[in-house]
Image (spheres, coloured by chain):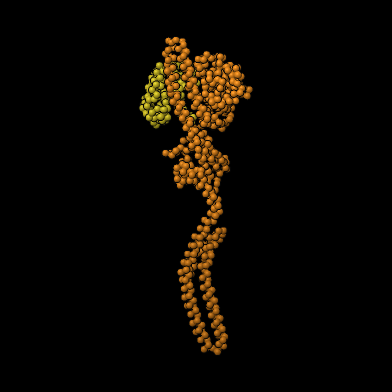
Chain colours: A orange, B yellow
Amino acid sequence: MDHLQQVLQYFRRYLFLVVFIENVVLVTGYWYLSSRTDLNPLLILAGFLGVALLFSWLFMFKASDRLIQPLRALWQAILHLSPGDQQLVPPPDLQKLRVGRELVANLTGQIYQLTSVADRVASNVRQEGSDLRRNFIANNLPLPLFVLDATETIRFANEAAAQYIGIASADLVGKNVYMVLDMSFPNEDTFDVWLKSAKTKNATATKSWERVRLNVRDNHPTRLFDLAGYYNKDNSQKAETMLVLFDHTKQYSQDEQAVSFIALSVHELRTPLTLLRGYIEVFEEELTGKIDPELADFMQKMSATAQQLTAFVNNILNVARVDNDQLELQLQSEDWSIVLTSSIDNLDLRAKVRGITLEHTIAPGLPPVGVDRLSIHEVINNLVDNAIKYSGTSKVIKIDSHLTPDGLVETTVQDSGLGISSSIMPNLFTKFYRDHRNRAQIGGTGLGLYLSNAIVTAHGGHLWVRSKLGEGSTFGFTLLPYSRLADEVKNSDNKEIVRGAHGWIKNHSLYRR
Amino acid sequence: MDPQPTIISPSVPAHRTVLCIEDEHFIGELYARSLSKAGYQVTVIPDGQQALVAAQTDQYDIILLDLMVPNLTGIEILRALRDPVLTPNLKAKIIITTNLEQREDVRQDIQKQADGYVVKAELTPHELVEFVNNIK
């Protein structure tokens, strides 16, 4: 307001001066004219008044113009800043102002400031509703949430995310997601693979993963979780990808601990077994021909028993794997006659010590099958072991392999022993199930068929049984020719196919490092 | 469990050297006995650290590597032996001998780096010799 008073002061000083000069001129002129001429004094007065009016008018016009100039400058400034026709109105030239330049400069500055604030407010108003809602939800979501931009840089991480991985959320923003989240997926179908393909193929995509492991540094406990991903191409908010983590550390690590406990137990069982088998073999080597035939027979039985125990230990381990969804098979193209023959050779001793002969026929020209050698060996092992156990007085077990009409490789193990009553058939493949009538006479755990069924199913095959009480049993299983398996995973350029007990897993590189 | 390899000619080249990294004394003893009988020169070292040094300094033809040995794990030894900087010019074939079941993915990883993988309980010493004979 100082400026305004200054202007008014100017104005008063000028006005006083102008009015003073004007009056002097008028009085002098009136005095001169009325003394010199005999004109009507009224007329002269009227003339002077007219001149005085003209002066005042001219002065007022000039003064008002000067006074209006700053207002015009302000108006120009406002027009210049108002959106729309900025090009048409140039910014005011404050240097041209004669009156109140400082004041106008000040006011214009304030206008500029106001406009920029208004701009920000205006743009915020547009998103305010959704932003507020989004921030509130995201921040208070009790699930770890990450938002990534197109370069996979973290744009936002909520408090739950920061706590979950033990890094402050401010330190997370701006980092590459893979630097922060070092995740291992249970198979090749990883987050980065999905994101890459989503970016090239999709406008939006969603996907979830189970049993993802967070490889944490330092002393942070390992995290196991399910992961959900949402992708939205070219999002104007620069938030292309959203990740939500569902923690299952407790549940999943319990599963893993169960398996690792069993794996450790198996290790402890295997070490003495290795030694037992080793020493038995040394005795066999050194004593063959030197000892009583009866003792030699005992020696063979000891050896067969040790083998059986080894097989059982493997069963335990694999049942734990099946139960925890960790059975993984490496299916490779194999000549079935070679695999089957080598398994049968291995079982020969066990049959022999019980006076049983294994007879096998393998149809010529079988196509190569897709099998995991170790696992399928366990299937044959279990089926033949069962046949030996339940053979009764019958002394021959027939193993037969052939091509079925629909092109599968089928293998049957047939005994002529006790047989199975139809009432218990439906329970045969259940864990720990055993035929109660035989429990007293025949040892076993009831794991063999349960495991065999899981393994055959994981191979894409089918395990079946045909039996009649008193007439013996036939167990059979089918395997897919490798070519069919290969068709099933066309996109896989790996030679190996990894398959889990509960469905396909495309091979391999299971750990991202 | 592993089907026995059916091997025909055990014409073992004389004095192939074997380093057996095995901390279970009796198993080492049994393996040394069978391998020596088959014409191999066998050194058994039960300590991981010492075994790695031995494997890096002396040239062995075959290394039998247990995964659970003291001071260095078998996996660490395997990695060091496969590292061209730590172990340049390793000519030995590495056979993993273990009774420990790995997670499937870990096992595959190990198998990729090794020349052979056996579960000890699955093989008698004689069968192990046959396995070693077959390593080219």
Quadrant for residue A397, please give it: top right
Identified at 57% across, 42% down, the residue is A204
Quadrant for residue A358, please give it: top right
Residue at the farthest right position: A405
In the drawing, does residue A83 fall left or right of residue B76?
Answer: right
Identified at 53% across, 87% down, the residue is A34
Q: Closer to the camera, A237 or B87?
A: A237
Asked whether residue A290 is in view, the answer is yes
Q: Position of residue A14 (x, y in %)?
A: 48, 75
In the drawing, does residue A282 fall left or right of residue A42?
Answer: left
Is residue A199 placed above or below B48 in the rendered structure? below
Q: Position of residue A337 (x, y in %)?
A: 55, 20
Q: Position of residue A202 (x, y in %)?
A: 57, 41
Q: Position of residue B87 (x, y in %)?
A: 39, 29
Is residue A227 placed above or below A83 in the rendered structure? above
Is residue B130 placed above or below A154 in the rendered structure? above
Total residue callouts: 0
